[in-house]
Amino acid sequence: MAITAEAVRKLRDMSGQGMMECKKALEEADGDQTKALELLRKKGFATAEKRVGRATANGIIHTYIHHNKRIGVLVQVNCETDFVARNTDFIKFADDLSKHIAAFSPIAVSRSQVDLKIVESEREIAKAQVVGKPANIIDKIVEGKLDKYFAERVLLEQPWIHDDKQSVGEVLKSLIGKIGENMTITQFARFDVGVVPSEE
């Protein structure tokens, strides 16, 4: 089937990928925009997996202050080179990420960074909620409840502010695939005038 320039442009606007990549994806998907977009995302994820582990010694610290001046965010996003640290897509991601953190108030970048006391507390709560269920499925239910908790509270697993069908981690992988460099969300701090900091 013939792929029109308009279809290629539309896919490019949706994916941010180059014209040739979009045309190839549309040809592979027989002109189906949704399938083509999914193909581009998978290719991006594959590229991202190859980049994992490469040193990310450059990057930026981005700030965001909400319009009411009561919520502020500092976020550090690292990449491999200073060149990418100045890339507009990279900077836009850091800006969107800081707004996401302001809106969704995650407690850690990844689940491995969540305090073990919090994990154990959530596990005990989940166990208490499944009392009386068959023993052979309790562990599975508890782990499912923990996964749901992490998806709500851990940055990389939260649904992305601009597209809740993708997690923050998936959006990051797509960007890695698009730019061709490893990137990491290193750390963040969220400040809220309405929340008193813990003294611990």
Image (cartoon, helix red, strand yellow):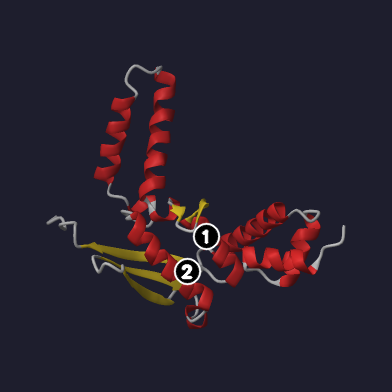
Amino acid at circle 1: Val
Q: Residue at x 37, y 42 (%)?
A: 149
Residue appearing at x 28%, y 26% in the figure: 128
Q: Which numbered circle lies on residue 93?
A: 2
From the image, which quarter does the N terminus lie in?
A: bottom right
**Above or below — where is 123 with respect to 104?**
above
Give x and y (percent) for residue 102.
33, 61
Q: Are marks 2 and 1 in contact (CB under 8 Å)?
A: yes
- Decide: is 148 above or below 132: below
Residue at screen point 25% across, 69% down: 69
For the residue carrying disc 2, how many other residues have a C-alpha within 10 Å: few (<14), some (14-19), or many (20+)?
some
Residue furthest to the left: 199
Callout 1: helix, strand or loop? Answer: helix
Measuring from the top left, give residue 68's x and y in whole percent. Answer: 26, 67
- Residue closest to the eye, 169 or 73: 73
111, 12: nearer the viewer = 12
- Residue ranking furthest to the right: 1
In the image, residue 12 sits, relative to residue 116, either above or below, namely below
**SS class, disc 2:** helix
Quadrant of the rendering where the C terminus is positioned:
bottom left
Spot occupied by residue 55 in the image (x, y as percentages of width and height): 47, 71
Residue 104 appears left or right of 93 = left
Specify whether 27 is left or right of 141.
right
Q: Quadrant of residue 76?
A: bottom left
For marks 2 and 1 on the same chain, the one whose residue lies earlier in the sequence: 2
Q: Count neighbours of disc 1 (C-alpha within 10 A) and say few if under 14, some if 14 to 19, many if 20 or more.
A: many
Question: What's the mark number on residue 78?
Answer: none
| Residue at (87% x, 61% y) in the render | 2
**Residue that carries the numbered disc 1 in the rendered image:** 171
Quadrant position of residue 110? bottom left
Q: Please name the amino acid that badge 2 sits on.
A: Phe
